[in-house]
Image (cartoon, coloured by chain):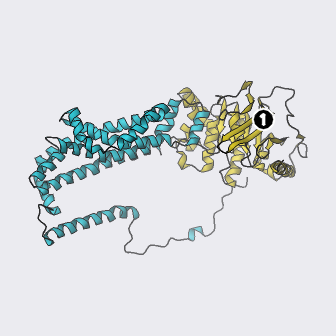
């Protein structure tokens, strides 16, 4: 056997990596966090300075410091009280639209006839400017949280369907041939190959759905509600309370970020567990 | 200096030479494969006839695109047969059979499963439970030196290691026939030598019938009991030869005069078959 001999190249250990020059050199991973954070902080500082410098009235654009003060002042109980229904309804809408999206994608991918009959209609449905339909949901579901959740599901399930379906369809053809050779049933192929393959795709759809579900609830609250951050924004704008508007938007942004982050964490946990 | 029994090039035999007396295990009878495309029909395989005896390691050797993979897929029930028929163990092939093992050019492992789970995948599909086959999986993985990697994922392995896992998976259900479609063609030359030695070892241990598709002459001569050479498209079997080198096969065998003479002869036959007839 000629291949069993291990030959160490001479002088390989003598090679040294040149040390980078001291100065503006950061670890790339750290830089990926620090650079955008510094940029954002710079923009906020610019905003803070521009408001008094240009003499912009606070009703038009309050400086970030004033927004922060108002946020702290009114967080408990007013803002929190309005944040809770918005957050809860968004979460419910997200969970339902994720389940609905994945199930619908499964149905579409498993039956050719259902797919040919349904999918073009689902796509066509998406061409409707969906926000315009929000008042219809009030007509159908009343003025309670049901109508907002239903509307939110309506706008957020579609990205989950499209992404999951792409995953279920794009399975490696070689793997499908292997399954055929091993005489796997359609259901076994679906369970053991298509679903695990589609998981990363599914999550990319679900990440979009986090944002869409919040948008759905806020639009619903704009149309009709007695509580929620959307309601608070409308209420504050009627009172010309611009600082409160921005405070409510800040809370929405933080919630959106945390929400997205949780889904991304669930994804990386599941992918690590599945080793893909 | 040589270990070869007869000391000369093994006897060359004509088509259908071996099995006139006993019933062959595999019978390929006037098999033809035509693909219908927008540009007209393409005849990938034209009228192939041969028999294979049980226990033989048979290589089908030919240049790329000569239809040899198509022929194997038809034997495995993964491609339809345009005309003629293939009989395995007395039954005409119409669909994939449960008693075959398959190894493809690409290892096609499930990336989200471990090495052990991948080896047991055919059993999981067939029986649901894999418990009864753990010992066999261990035996196979130990034979190819991968038992300690059983909990690794495919992406943590080299290409050669992945293909070894695929071979173990092909053998897990103790198939009567193992079909291999250029399993080592994506590997570098050194891994390829390694894999050939490993497969020869596995063969001596399990000794089933095997069909091995390859375009490597040395690989075919090293591994096979018999070699069928296919001509260019529309392809037929243009040469059929027994390889009587003793087993176990050793790498040193490749340095013998007989080995290299046989390789030279096959190269000539491939060239002849590749000329427009």
Q: Residue at 10%, 51% (x, y): give it.
A: A238
Compared to residue A80, the image places residue A27 above or below, namely: below
Q: Residue at 76%, 41% (x, y): give it.
A: B59
Classify residue A151 by image quadrant.
Answer: top left
Q: Residues within 10 Å of mark 1 (few under 14, many from 20)?
A: some
Residue B42, position in %: x, y? 71, 42
Classify residue B231 by image quadrant.
Answer: top right
Specify whether B155 is left or right of B196.
left
Compared to residue A262, the image places residue A49 above or below, namely: below
Q: Which chain is yellow?
A: B
Q: Residue at 16%, 50% (x, y): give it.
A: A233
Instruction: From the viewer's side, name the closer residue of B9 and A188.
Output: A188
Q: Which residue is denoted by mark 1 in the rendering? A: B56
Specify whether A147 is left or right of B237.
left
Q: Secondary structure at mark 1?
A: loop
Instruction: From the viewer's side, name the closer residue of B88 and A14.
Output: B88
Residue A135 is at least partly visible in this image? yes
Residue B242 is at least partly visible in this image? no
The chain that hosts pointer 1 is B
Specify whether B175 is left or right of A31.
right
Residue B237, position in %: x, y? 81, 40
Compared to residue A41, the image places residue A189 above or below, namely: above
Q: Which chain is cyan?
A: A
Residue A82, position in %: x, y? 15, 44
Classify residue A41 by image quadrant.
Answer: bottom left
């Amino acid at each position: 056997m000629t291949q069993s001999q291990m030959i160490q190249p001479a002088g390989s250990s003598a090679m040294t990596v040149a040390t980078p020059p001291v100065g503006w050199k950061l670890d790339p991973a750290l830089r990926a966090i620090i650079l955008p954070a510094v940029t954002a902080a710079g923009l906020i500082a610019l905003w803070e300075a521009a408001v008094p410098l240009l003499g912009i009235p606070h009703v038009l654009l309050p400086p970030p410091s004033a927004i922060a003060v108002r946020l702290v002042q009114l967080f408990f109980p007013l803002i929190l009280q309005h944040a809770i229904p918005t957050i809860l309804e968004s979460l419910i809408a997200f969970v339902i639209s994720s389940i609905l999206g994945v199930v619908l994608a499964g149905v579409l991918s498993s039956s050719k006839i259902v797919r040919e009959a349904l999918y073009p209609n689902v796509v066509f449905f998406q061409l409707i400017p969906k926000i315009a339909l929000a008042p219809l949901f009030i007509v159908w579901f009343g003025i309670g949280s049901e109508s907002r959740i239903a509307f939110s599901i309506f706008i957020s399930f579609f990205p989950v369907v499209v992404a999951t379906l792409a995953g279920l369809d794009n399975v490696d053809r070689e793997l499908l041939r292997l399954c055929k050779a091993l005489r796997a049933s359609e259901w076994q192929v679906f369970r053991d190959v298509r679903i695990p393959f589609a998981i990363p795709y599914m999550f990319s759809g679900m990440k979009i759905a986090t944002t869409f579900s919040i948008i759905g609830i806020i639009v619903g609250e704009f149309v009709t509600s007695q509580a929620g951050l959307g309601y608070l924004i409308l209420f504050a704008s009627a009172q010309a309370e611009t600082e409160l508007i921005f405070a409510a938007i800040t809370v929405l942004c933080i919630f959106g970020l945390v929400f997205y982050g949780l889904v991304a964490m669930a994804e990386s946990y599941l992918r690590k567990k599945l080793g893909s | 200096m040589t270990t070869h029994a007869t000391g000369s090039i093994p006897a060359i035999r004509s088509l259908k030479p071996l099995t006139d007396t006993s019933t062959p295990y595999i019978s390929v009878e006037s098999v033809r494969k035509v693909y219908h495309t927008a540009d007209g029909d393409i005849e990938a395989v034209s009228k192939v006839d041969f028999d294979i005896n049980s226990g033989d390691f048979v290589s089908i050797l030919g240049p790329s695109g000569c239809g040899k993979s198509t022929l194997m897929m038809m034997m495995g029930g993964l491609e339809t047969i345009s005309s003629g028929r293939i009989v395995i163990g007395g039954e005409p092939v119409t669909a994939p059979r449960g008693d075959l093992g398959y190894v493809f050019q690409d290892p096609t492992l499930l990336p989200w499963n471990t090495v052990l789970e991948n080896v047991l995948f055919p059993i999981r599909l067939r029986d649901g439970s894999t418990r009864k086959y753990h010992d066999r999986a261990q035996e196979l993985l130990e034979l190819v030196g991968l038992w300690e990697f059983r909990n690794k994922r495919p992406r943590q392995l080299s290409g050669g290691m992945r293909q070894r896992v695929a071979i173990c998976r092909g053998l897990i259900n103790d198939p009567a026939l193992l079909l291999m479609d250029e399993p080592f063609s994506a590997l570098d030359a050194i891994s390829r030598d390694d894999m050939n030695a490993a497969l020869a070892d596995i063969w001596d241990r399990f000794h089933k019938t095997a069909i091995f598709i390859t375009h490597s002459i040395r690989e075919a001569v090293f591994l096979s009991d018999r070699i069928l050479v296919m001509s260019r498209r529309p392809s037929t079997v243009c040469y059929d030869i027994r390889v009587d080198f003793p087993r176990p096969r050793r790498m040193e065998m490749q340095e013998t005069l007989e080995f290299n003479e046989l390789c030279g002869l096959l190269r000539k036959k491939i060239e002849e078959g590749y000329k427009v007839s």
